[in-house]
Amino acid sequence: MLVDDHAIVRMGFRMLLGTPDIEVAAEAESGEQACQDYAQVRPDVVVIDLSMPGMGGLEALRRLLAHDPAARVLVLSAHEATAYPQRAFKTGALGYLSKRGAPEQLIDAVRTVAAGRRYVDPQMAQKLALAQIDGEASPADMLSEREFAVFLQLAQGLSVAQIADHLKLAASTVGTHLYNVKQKLNASNQSELTLIALRWGLIQA
């Protein structure tokens, strides 16, 4: 199952994955649609983008695995920050591939994840290893899974009401997460949170 909000990207991936041993069983344009269709399609592998409107890829990943702990998910992302693969693997993804990778890497990644093995593209694997060696820590490391999801959407300019709708949470719960995020990141407003996210490569300008 291909999950990406850009139809042209899905079309490119579908063409790329046109091999004898791989079949694209379904496509979804949002995390919400992926979660709805997964039970009916039961794909061997879900290839999901992180940056999508609505709940986003990380939240969709969490929900897919809550529904089916055996789901095999390959995360595909344009983000270079190590915080994303770290979060994705912690949530339960089996693979992480940069959209900047060579096309044949997608085929290798899908086959590896389908076999139940972990996959990290070489460039990101090196970044993760160096970050661990250097002891580099992103401010986002201090945040819980829910706080991280709220932080990302706040940093992108969404309101509390919009985030509550996307994450299916009460506005008061989002408000509590917002308070905790500000405390942990030593930020006083939404603009400062956006600057922190930009500085650490968690969002793009």
Image (spheres, rainbow, N blue to C red):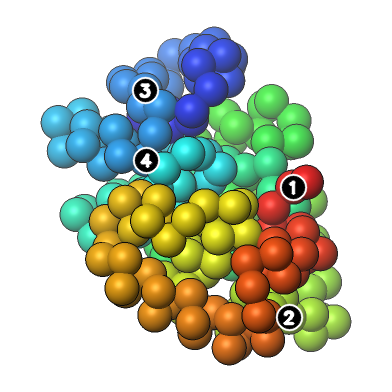
Estimate the spatial distance between the alpha carbons at disc 1 and disc 3, rounded to whole Å: 26 Å
Q: Which residue is mark 2?
A: 137
Instruction: Give the amino acid type for the residue marked by disc 3 in the picture.
Output: Glu
- Looking at the image, residue 45 sits to the left or right of residue 76; the answer is left
As drawn, the label of residue 204 is: 1
As drawn, the label of residue 27 is: 3
Estimate the spatial distance between the alpha carbons at disc 4 and disc 2, rounded to whole Å: 28 Å
Residue at image location 77% in from the left, 59% down from the top: 198
- Looking at the image, residue 117 sits to the left or right of residue 203; the answer is left
Q: Secondary structure at mark 3?
A: strand
Quadrant where the image shows the N terminus: top left
Instruction: Give the amino acid type for the residue marked by disc 2 in the picture.
Output: Ala
In percent of width and height, residue 140 lies at 63, 74
- State whether residue 44 appears in this view: no
The numbered mark, 2 or 3, whose residue comes first in the sequence reads 3
Crowdedness near tag 3: few (<14), some (14–19) or many (≥20) residues, C-alpha within 10 Å: many
In percent of width and height, residue 195 lies at 76, 64
Tell which of 151 and 86 is nearer to you: 151
As drawn, the label of residue 192 is: none
Estimate the spatial distance between the alpha carbons at disc 2 and disc 3, rounded to whole Å: 35 Å
In percent of width and height, residue 87 lies at 53, 66
Q: Which residue is mark 4?
A: 31
Estimate the spatial distance between the alpha carbons at disc 3 and disc 4, rounded to whole Å: 11 Å
